[in-house]
């Protein structure tokens, strides 16, 4: 069989790996990618060390990342994150996040009260959750969707939603919790609310139900040479197994009897995985869909973000860097700052920095906050260095100029899982199953934005394609 994978990010490469592995190497696979293989997994030199420009780690609780590394023989190359404590910049001050948060929602009231993040009234409103009747949106046993903000504010009050959940969950998706789907982005919160009268009680029960972890296991890991090493190893192994890589921009896809035809060169395949943002995928699929059949995901929204990497002499940022377990700072919306977060990269990954230097990564961009995009690189760096002075408390002495800096812009890169997202994904897959069953979907537009989630999405897309081929009676060789 011949398969095409359109898109060479980590989801597309994972789809190609699954197609090759599941068929014992008998399938001929071609990956179409005109740009960088690995997509956002991009590592480059910074102050003489490999430092990531995109994602810098994999979440271990989502197993697909670790599983793929094991298959590729990369287990001994993985490094555990060294720092895992974050602070929140809110109300003009740095405050520790209270113990017992689940995606920003508290499972305990006392640490919340001690944190100083909420007003006395906000703490009292959150505590009312344990006595209020079950909310209307949680009375169904089925997972009906609502916004994250609505779910949390209804039970715990607006301050918890705005001051805790928004900076934590909103930063993950570069979105607003007032639009983000609870079912798609915070299923733990939705399940806890639906299974219990009290959200706090539900989260507490969830925490108690977790099995003992034994020896402390890291929450995040990454290859020592950076996240691109994972993509590079995949490309290397796929090449050895006969996968072809075409540096070509696909212009459209259509059918010819039982074949899927990829343009611009008119190559015929038995099936294809579209590992692209949903609007791009459905634009290319236009010729094979019934008229007017494009699903709602064809209009899916995306947000642009940037990561600004800064290198300083350690003495310039000695306060936060000297707290070796401090991984970074989240910035609450409404703080008047352009930055959304600051990651203390050399605390998390000591191999990122040489003696006497510290590496920080500052993130900008979220839904409704795109003014940063109008600044050129130098102005953006100057603005963010000024904001770091405010956040890190370096005034009046000021923050010395960075030893080096780098701006990595990621336009339209963050998929927005708005309310009803899971239903839209189901609708999209139903359209394909009806109109072109030998095409499947993969990538961050559908079932998770993290690296392990994208790996899982790619592999599922490949399995769906192979299942469709079997149902049509197509040979596997």
Image (spheres, rainbow, N blue to C red):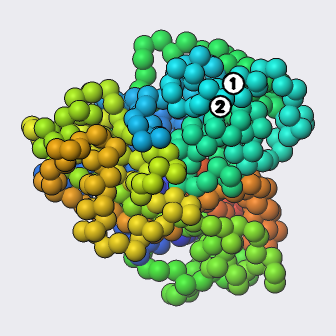
For the point 64% across and 79% down, the residue is 283
In the depicted structure, whether residue 342 falls above or below residue 287: above
For the residues labelled 2 and 1, say whether their Cβ atoms are less than 8 Å apart: yes
Q: Is residue 339 left or right of residue 27?
A: left
In the depicted structure, whether residue 152 falls above or below residue 235: above
Q: Quadrant of residue 337?
A: bottom left
Asked if residue 118 can be seen in this view, the reply is yes
Q: Nearer the viewer, residue 389 or 362?
A: 389
Q: Quadrant of residue 355?
A: top left
Q: CA distance from mark 2 to mark 1?
A: 5 Å
For the point 31% across and 65% down, the residue is 380
Q: How many marks?
A: 2
Quarter that holds the C terminus: bottom right
Q: Position of residue 377 (x, y in %)?
A: 28, 69
For the point 53% across and 44% down, the residue is 167
Instruction: Name the secondary structure under disc 2.
Output: helix
Asked if residue 232 can be seen in this view, the reply is no
Q: Which mark is residue 122?
A: 2
Q: Which mark is residue 124?
A: 1
């Amino acid at each position: 069989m011949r398969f095409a994978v359109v898109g060479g990010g980590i989801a597309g490469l994972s789809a190609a790996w699954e197609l090759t592995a599941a068929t014992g190497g008998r399938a001929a696979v071609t990956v179409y990618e005109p740009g960088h293989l690995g997509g956002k997994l991009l590592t480059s030199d910074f102050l003489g060390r490999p430092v990531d420009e995109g994602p810098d780690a994999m979440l271990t609780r989502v197993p697909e990342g670790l599983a793929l590394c094991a298959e590729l023989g990369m287990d001994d190359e993985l490094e555990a994150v060294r720092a895992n404590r974050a602070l929140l910049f809110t109300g003009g001050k740095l405050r520790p996040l209270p113990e017992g948060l689940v995606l920003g929602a508290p499972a305990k009231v006392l640490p919340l009260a001690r944190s100083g993040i909420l007003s006395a009234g906000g703490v009292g409103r959150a505590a009312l959750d344990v006595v209020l009747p079950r909310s209307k949106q949680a009375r169904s046993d089925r997972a009906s969707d609502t916004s994250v903000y609505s779910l949390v504010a209804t039970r715990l009050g607006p301050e918890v939603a705005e001051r805790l959940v928004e900076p934590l969950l909103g930063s993950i998706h570069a979105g607003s919790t007032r639009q983000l789907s609870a079912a798609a982005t915070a299923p733990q919160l939705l399940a806890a609310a639906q299974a219990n009268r009290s959200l706090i009680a539900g989260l507490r029960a969830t925490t108690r139900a977790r099995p003992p972890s034994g020896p402390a296991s890291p929450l995040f890991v990454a290859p020592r040479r950076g996240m691109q090493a994972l993509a590079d190893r995949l490309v290397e192994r796929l090449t050895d197994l006969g996968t072809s890589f075409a540096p070509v921009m696909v212009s459209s896809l259509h059918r010819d009897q039982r074949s899927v035809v990829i343009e611009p060169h008119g190559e015929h395949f038995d099936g294809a995985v579209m590992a692209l943002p949903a609007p791009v995928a459905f634009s290319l699929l236009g010729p094979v869909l019934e008229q007017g059949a494009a699903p709602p995901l064809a209009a899916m929204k995306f947000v642009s973000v940037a990561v600004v990497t800064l290198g300083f002499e350690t003495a310039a940022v000695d306060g936060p860097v000297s707290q070796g377990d401090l991984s970074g700072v989240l910035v609450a919306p409404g703080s008047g700052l352009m930055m959304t977060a600051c990651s203390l990269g050399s605390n998390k990954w000591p191999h990122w920095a040489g003696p006497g230097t510290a590496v920080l990564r500052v993130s900008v961009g979220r839904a409704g906050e795109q003014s940063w995009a109008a600044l050129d690189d130098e102005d953006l760096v100057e603005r963010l260095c000024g904001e770091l002075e405010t956040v890190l408390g370096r005034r009046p002495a000021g923050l010395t100029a960075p030893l080096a800096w780098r701006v990595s812009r990621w336009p339209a890169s963050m998929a927005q899982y708005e309310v009803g997202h899971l239903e839209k994904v189901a609708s999209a897959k139903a359209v394909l199953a009806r109109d072109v069953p030998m095409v499947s979907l993969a990538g961050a537009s559908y079932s998770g934005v993290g690296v392990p989630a994208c790996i899982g999405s790619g592999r599922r897309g490949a399995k769906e394609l192979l299942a469709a081929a079997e149902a049509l009676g197509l040979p596997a060789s």
